Image: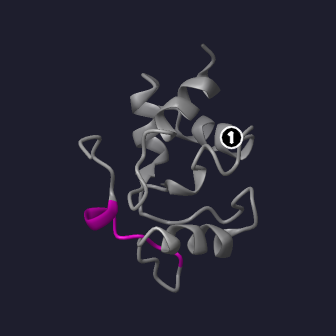
Amino acid sequence: MSFYDKVYEQVLKIPAGKVATYGQIAALCNSPRASRAVGFALHANPMPGVIPCHRVVNRFGGLAPAFAFGGPEVQKELLEAEGIEVSEDFLVNLEQYRWTGEE
């Protein structure tokens, strides 16, 4: 299984209404220093709408400045449609919305 496949497998586990960080996904793929590679994998998402890459944010809860499928505004809309509050400066409260893997 390729690294990208591992990324997609983990991202598919994030439930609606929750987010994970790039670093969190990298760690789940047994590559804790590969958060940037997670971003590359999500940018190449082969199944947008199926693999919920919009649920992955940076370590501060920030949305992707170049969200692959329409920019941070589109990512914000997708997250808000799932009940996640996103601030005007495109931040998600990780204490409230971070996926712990137990949901």
The answer to if 92 sits in the magenta stretch is yes
- x, y percent for residue 51: 60, 43
Q: Which residue is at 42% across, 50% downward? A: 20
Query: Exactly how many numbered labels are in the figure?
Result: 1
Q: Is residue 91 left or right of residue 102?
A: right
Q: Which residue is at 42% across, 22% downward? A: 30
> Circle 1 is placed at which residue position?
40
Residue lying farthest to the bottom in this orientation: 88
Establish if 17 lies above or below 50.
Answer: below
- x, y percent for residue 68: 74, 56
Establish if 52 lies above or below 64.
Answer: above
Residue lying farthest to the top in this orientation: 1
Q: Is residue 101 left or right of residue 30?
A: left
Where the N terminus falls, by quadrant? top right
Crowding around mark 1 (Cα neighbors within 10 Å: few <14, some 14 to 19, many 20+) is few
Establish if 16 lies above or below 65.
Answer: above
The answer to if 99 sits in the magenta stretch is no
Under circle 1, the secondary element is helix
Q: Is residue 26 left or right of residue 52?
A: left
Q: Which residue is at 40% across, 41% downward? A: 24
Q: Which residue is at 52% across, 86% downward? A: 88
| Range shown magenta | 90-97
- x, y percent for residue 87: 46, 82
Q: Nearer the viewer, residue 3 or 78?
A: 78
Image quadrant assignment for residue 2: top right
- x, y percent for residue 73: 66, 76
Tell me which amino acid carries mark 1: Phe
